[in-house]
Amino acid sequence: MKLMGKRAGILFILCVLFAVGMIFLLFTYIKDAPKWAAAPFNQHLYRSGELVRAGQILDANGKVLVSTIENERVYNSDESTRAALMHLVGDPKRGVATSLQVTYRNKLVGWNYLNGIYHFGGGIGNNIQTTVDADLARATYAALGGRRGTACVMNYKTGDLLCMVSSPSFDPANVPDIEGDPEKYDGVYINRLLSASYTPGSIFKLVTAAAAIDNLPGVQSREFVCEGSYDLLGQEITCPSVHGRQNFAETMANSCNIAYARMASELGPETMTAYAGKAGVMSGQDLDGIGVANGHFSLTGAAPGDVGWAGVGQYDTLINPLSYLEFVAAIANGGSAVTPHIIDSIKTPNGFPARFAIDLPIHENVLSGSTAGTLRQIMRAAVVNNYGEGNLAGYGLSAKSGTAEVADGKEPHSWFCGFLDDETAPLAFIVIVENGGAGKDAAANVARTVLEAAVGK
């Protein structure tokens, strides 16, 4: 009996270990099988490390951006389109980590737990339709003219990204010798909209203005005096121009450093930090599951002058362009920010949904309706009185420029962001041209060209 008992105990232990092993194997399979199936060592899908068998990626109008033909990955027939959308679609060697061919490779190859990568009725993987307009992306890439930077256009009512372009880029169908020309292709695999953070310069004054409207009683009726420099408790704040006496709205059109440094100093580190958080400056989000870089805003231990410089978008403040675009879109949208997205649908080879759409969350009360309305008014006044509308008269162009000083004595980064206050074209935009100089010149010219293409001017 003792022997039988021992054997039963050993058998029980073995059964328990077997069950634990099966649970661990099942857990590992559920967690890792999609990655194993779509890994580059799978010769059913890859050749020499290059993806050769996967579904199509299309633009918003159904234009094919990349597809598989006879076990070869074939990109769009237009060279400019290929280069403009390389950071979205991806390159053969998977260098752009945020591209769809990397981040959505499981969906593109059509993996599922029931059939693996086998597809009943034929077909190759799932097809992804994006929200981007290939023609608009091509026009945007041309407007950037080879300069480093990024530009994005978003429908602030739906969250659709109509355009996402990063430069420099290259033709993924004819990959150049990138290592042989490191200066030309420096940072070429980085999608600057998603994976970069920059000193914002004066576009950050929108955040300071929002904080001042909400927390400094009577600020909209105050008069601000600018004599070109101001001593803020021992630290000099300088302004490129002498603006003299100006009201609150005029400080935005003049982009007066002294006015906004004084407001930031009055608001203090705690309030400024809270509003930087409201603007999404510090928190990284994601774009349809694709990671987006964090920004940076910290006034811990900062001197009063540092707080002032932070209020004008300098000090050590950094923003991610897409995150800040969401804040700009919230201003246009009455204070509510819709989540940006770039994937419209994913379908099987037979046309059935491979991912069911869900309602995108609306982040209410990023700003109050009245604060957003005031910001819209002063951004509109800045265009009318300073920047000019170009060919966009009638669309309610409202904007803010930024000239962000950078280290090493290089030219400042050039920013331009804003929106069209028009129900027929609810478009928000952001542009940065690295080392482009004044924001109202380089970045503004790119933005106008892009918006004119977007509305068909």
Image (tube, helix red, strand yellow):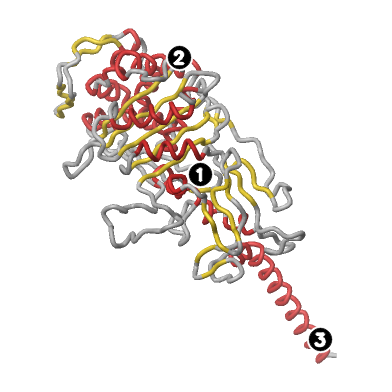
Percent across and percent down for residue 311 are: 29, 28
State if disc 3 and disc 2 touch (CB < 8 Å): no
The residue depicted at 40 percent of the width and 44 percent of the height is: 166
Q: Earlier in the sequence, mark 3 or mark 1?
A: 3
Badge 1 marks a residue whose secondary structure is: strand
Circle 2 is placed at which residue position?
Answer: 394
Q: Residue at x 26, y 9 (%)?
A: 223
For the C terminus, give its image quadrant: top left
Q: Amino acid at mark 1?
A: Asp
Q: Identity of the amino acid at label 2?
A: Gly
Residue 447 lies left or right of residue 362; in this view the side is left
Residue 318 in the image, given as x and y percentages of width and height: 33, 39
Which-is-in-front pick, marks 2 and 3?
2
Q: What secondary structure is found at the residue carrying circle 2?
A: loop
How many neighbours does mark 1 have within 10 angstroms: few (below 14), some (14-19), or many (20 or more)? Answer: some
Q: List the single residue furthest toward the front.
A: 77
In terms of secondary structure, where does tag 3 sit?
Answer: helix
Mark sitting on residue 286: 1
Of marks 3 and 1, the one in the foreground: 1
Q: Which mark is residue 5?
A: 3
Q: Position of residue 410 (x, y in %)?
A: 19, 41
Q: What residue sits 31% from the left and 62% below the top?
A: 179
Q: Which mark is residue 416?
A: none
Vertical arrangement, residue 243 with respect to residue 356, above or below: above
| Residue 322 located left or right of residue 338 | left
Q: Residues within 10 Å of mark 3 (few under 14, many from 20)?
A: few
